[in-house]
Image: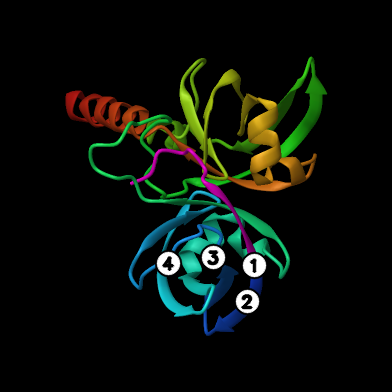
Amino acid sequence: MFSGIVETMAQVVKIETEQTNKHFTLRNPFGEPLSIDQSIAHNGVCLTVVKIEGDLYTVTAMQETLRLTNLDLLKVGDWVNVERSMLMGGRLDGHIVQGHVDQKATCIDAHETDGSWYYRFEYDSTREMVERGYFCVDKGSVSINGVSLTVCEPDIKGDKGYVSVCIIPYTEENTNFKYIQPGTVVNIEFDILGKYMARYLSQMNQMSK
């Protein structure tokens, strides 16, 4: 489990394909050793450390993860947001983030505004997805590329959902949001509490029919 408070960024130094899996090797940016089996969120995707060589570590993404996230688009030299799992007893500065990305979203607007940065994203939306909690509510929480953010201007039109977020300069500078521009594909994880409530209500409605 994570909080969506990105610690730093890690750079991809090698990508290997093995059948339908991809192995990503990154440079350890944490300033302290990692361990095998440790969970680290990469652009919001929870991945397990499977290999360590000096200051490099490797994680593996399976086919389903690659299909649902932007990890399949990564290239050597790209920077990803990274966060180690939460410590029990620590402060929850963001919101509860599972590291289980729900789907991809595409940036349709990015611009500076009064010292901060504004981003708007578009994602696929169907009735079934809404019933599963794949939507945003105003002033709610959403994780984009692993960053815990407050929702503004959520909307659903036809088969598309929309969400906007505003980024303070510190977040812009210290995460890969500074590389996001219109057309960039990001990972989005909707609020787990909202998903539980939406699925509960959907099940109750089906049972009452």
Residue 111 as seen in the image, left or right of residue 93: right
Residue linked to disc 2:
15
Q: Which mark is residue 94?
A: none
The residue identified by callout 3 is 28
Whether tag 2 and tag 1 are in contact, CB under 8 A, the answer is: yes
Q: Earlier in the sequence, mark 4 or mark 1?
A: 1
Earlier-in-chain disc, 3 versus 2: 2
Callout 1 crowding tier (Cα within 10 Å): few <14, some 14–19, many ≥20: many
Local packing at callout 3 (Cα closer than 10 Å; few below 14, some 14-19, many 20+) is many
Q: Residue at x 40, y 38 (%)?
A: 3
Above or below 202: residue 18: below
Task: Identify which amino acid the numbered label 1 is placed on.
Answer: Val
- Kindly identify the amino acid type of the residue bearing the numbered disc 2: Ile
Q: Position of residue 125 (x, y in %)?
A: 55, 35
* In this rendering, the label closer to the viewer, 4 or 2: 4
Residue 33, which numbered label?
4
What is the distance, in whole Å, between disc 2 and disc 1 at their CAs?
8 Å
Residue 155, placed above or below residue 129:
above
The residue under label 1 is 12
In the rendered view of the protein, which quadrant contains the C terminus? top left
**Please, what secondary structure does the residue beneath circle 2 have?**
strand
Image quadrant in which you'd find residue 172: top right
At 79% from the left and 41% from the top, the residue drawn is 181
Q: Which residues are magenta?
A: 1-11
User: 34 left or right of 156?
Assistant: left
**Crowd tier of the residue under label 4, counting other residues whose Cα lies within 10 Å: few below 14, some 14–19, many 20 or above:** few
Kind of residue at disc 4: Pro
Q: Judging from the image, what secondary structure is the residue with disc 4 in? A: loop
Give the number of the mark in front: 2 or 1: 1
Q: Residue furthest left?
A: 207
Query: Is 135 included in the stretch rendered in magenta?
Result: no
